[in-house]
Image (spheres, helix red, strand yellow):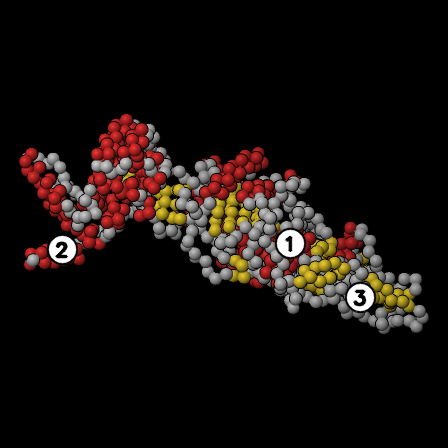
Amino acid sequence: MQLVFLLLLAFLVIDTRSPIPTNVSYSKVVLDNKNNFLHAYLSNDDKWRLYTEVNEITPELIQSIRVKEDRFFFYHPGVNPIAVVRAAVNNFRKGYRTSGASTITMQVVRLLHPRSRKISSKIIEMINAFQLEWHYSKKEILQLYINLLPYGGNIEGIKSASLLYYNKFPQHLSLSEIALLSTIPNNPEKYKVGRDNDILKLKRDQLLHYFDQRKTFSHVIIEDALTEEVTAQRREFQKFAPHFCNYVIKNAHENNILTTLNKQFQAQVESLSKAYIKQLKYKDIHNLSVLVIDNHNQNILAYLGSQDFNDADYAGQVDGTNALRSPGSTLKPLIYALAFDKGLFTPKSVLSDLPINFDGYEPENYDEEYNGLVTIEDALANSLNVPAVKVLNTLSVEEFTSTLSEADFAWIQQNKKTLGLSLALGGCGVTLQELTGLYVAFANDGNWQPLQFLKDHDNRTEKHQIISKASDFMLYEILTQITRPDLPNEFANAKNLPKIAWKTGTSYGRRDAWSIGYNKNITVGVWAGNFSGKGVPDLSGAEIATPLMIDIFNALDYDQSETGFRMPDSLALRYVCKVSGKVPNDFCNNQILDYYIPQISSQMKCDHLKKTWVNNVNTISYCSYCLPNETVMEKLYPNLAGDLITFYEKQNIPYLKIPPHNPNCSHLFADHPPKITQPSDGAIYYIDTVANEKILFKADAHNDVKELFWYVNDQLVGSSAINEQLFFTLPEGTVEITCTDDKGRAGKIKIEVTYL
């Protein structure tokens, strides 16, 4: 008894001071959301050593290993004393080593820490075997064993062998396949799978007959296994969705990485994209990137970094979903939604689409045309640039960038202090992941959460309500319109157009084409272009990116009996004036329904007409200061802004003009002064002395103005009609320019002139 106690004490001291390390470097395996194999990576020591989970060890596999290697595995403490005695006696009698006494536990020790075949090594293995049994269960030891079994070359473990030789997981192996794989570790370098299959078949059959003698399995099952052909051959690991897999392993710590990717969806997206890129290459467009997101949980369902990972000619290994690109017009929906939430506009609100100068920044529409008065919904549906910049200017760039920062737009968050109004038209850097994530928020009542790459690994923070449910619904109603220019020609009369909301974008220089769409179930983001940054004349979001986006929707989620979008209680309907989009006045005869947010949307009454006193033949107008005693009448005239009048005059668009003001009236007016549009206030102008260049003078004036007078440093230099352009030579230095209309109202600016 005392001896037993001393031995136990000695063991505990050894175990404490010299614990057996069992840390093994495993290959990382990436799986889809249904445990399908996607990709595998070499371990840190360059082995194909794939970690086998406990639930992958089937009863047949356990039984086969136990009967072949260690029948009493579940009963001994790591060392089988009977086997040790028997081996010692046999070896002594023969004078040389005829059999061993290694248990599975001892083999695990040897696989973990190989040693030379000496008696001292065997003793150390026995001690280590006791240590393993002390710290681990039998199933865990068996798990270590099948993870470390050598299968030739750099292949270790039953899972690696199963996938590389049979292209299936261990739990799907047949008894015949289990038996064949059980024979290889005895001499892994002697017989090569594929080359020596006939010999391996003989060894498999010997093992199956041994199982039959031991009644390990039923005779019928073994007979079936004996008739099975040997199909094992060395394969390469498939590399499915390589961009996605490369992305997720960067921060994943598990050996078997269970992701959100849907392998079937991924295959469909890859197939559609590979077919589509063949068409685009004729247009000198060579790269595509696609994301498909499950809107219910933000899970990545499909992730295409490029048209082909192996396309060396066109940088196929670049991950386009995470590349920084210009978003074109794809951020416009958020601008309008934020403006709805601030009560600045509603869908039927009217604003002007006209040339404008924001301190030197002069945005233009895509087609370089202007449309006069447009509604907000038409401006967004037609992706007009000038209205979007105007709305952003009213909203404020800071408000917009703060919201984008909440939605994890990294580049914008880092550079938001230096960004300006060009943001509305793509003057920033974004990624497809960020943009698609934003549209997932549009599909979820304005709630933003980060995209999910790993299944059952919820790294989402608290939801960010970046826009309200009310503005989100108004956005959906606008973006589902199909009478719009970004509907590709081929789908104009198509019956298979899915019910989706979508927005396109084309970056400056036609370098990036975007199309991002969503319904209640999924969001699809498509980018097309060239990773090199090369612009292409035919590149546009509507004609290049949208067809693929629609095809993906039709393939993955076409049958939608319910759209899932319902008007929230926080939103209401009201009648507004069709001309102005404002609350109707008593002169508003043409009224239409419009969405609005009670207590938030503007209640400003319509002012598109104004009352003016005129004589009975409509040739003279009067103000309250010069109103004559004879008969006059009140008449409604368009209350047009100066820039709109300039546009109408230039385009020869007729409008009702206010008659000239009473020439005998000496009253000076204060409201609606002229607005100087050229030169730009505060600008610096460099003049070529030799060329004797002149500077353009332009101004917008009110409806009641007929003539403008121009002053330079308080000196009259000329006069013009309201739509007339004048050119003047200016002195060097600081120059004050004044424009006075025929009612005495004045507008002033200052510029700097330098002669070169």
Q: Which residue is mark 3?
A: 586
Q: Is residue 266 visible?
A: yes
How many numbered circles does the render carry? 3
Quadrant, the C terminus: bottom right
Structural distance between the alpha carbons of marks 3 and 2: 100 Å
Secondary-structure class at tag 1: helix
Closer to the camera in the image, 433 or 449: 449
Cβ atoms at labels 1 and 2 below 8 Å apart: no
Residue 25: x %, y % from top left: 29, 47
Tell me what residue is drawn at x 35 percent, y 43 percent.
41
Structural distance between the alpha carbons of marks 1 and 3: 29 Å
- Tag nearer the camera, 3 or 2: 2
Residue 62: x %, y % from top left: 27, 43
Q: Which residue is mark 1?
A: 477
Secondary-structure class at tag 2: helix
Specify whether 603 is left or right of 323.
right
Tell me what residue is drawn at x 57 percent, y 42 percent.
554
Structural distance between the alpha carbons of marks 1 and 2: 75 Å
Secondary-structure class at tag 3: loop
Q: Quadrant of residue 170?
A: top left
Label 2 Cα neighbours within 10 Å, binned few <14 / some 14-19 / many ≥20: some
Q: Amino acid at mark 1?
A: Glu
Quadrant, the N terminus: bottom left
**Mark linked to residue 40:** none
Label 1 Cα neighbours within 10 Å, binned few <14 / some 14-19 / many ≥20: some
Q: Which residue is mark 2?
A: 11
Tell me what residue is drawn at x 81 percent, y 57 percent.
721
Residue 268: x %, y % from top left: 50, 40
Label 3 Cα neighbours within 10 Å, binned few <14 / some 14-19 / many ≥20: few
* Residue lying farthest to the right in this orientation: 630
Q: Amino acid at mark 3?
A: Asp
Q: Quadrant of residue 335?
A: bottom right
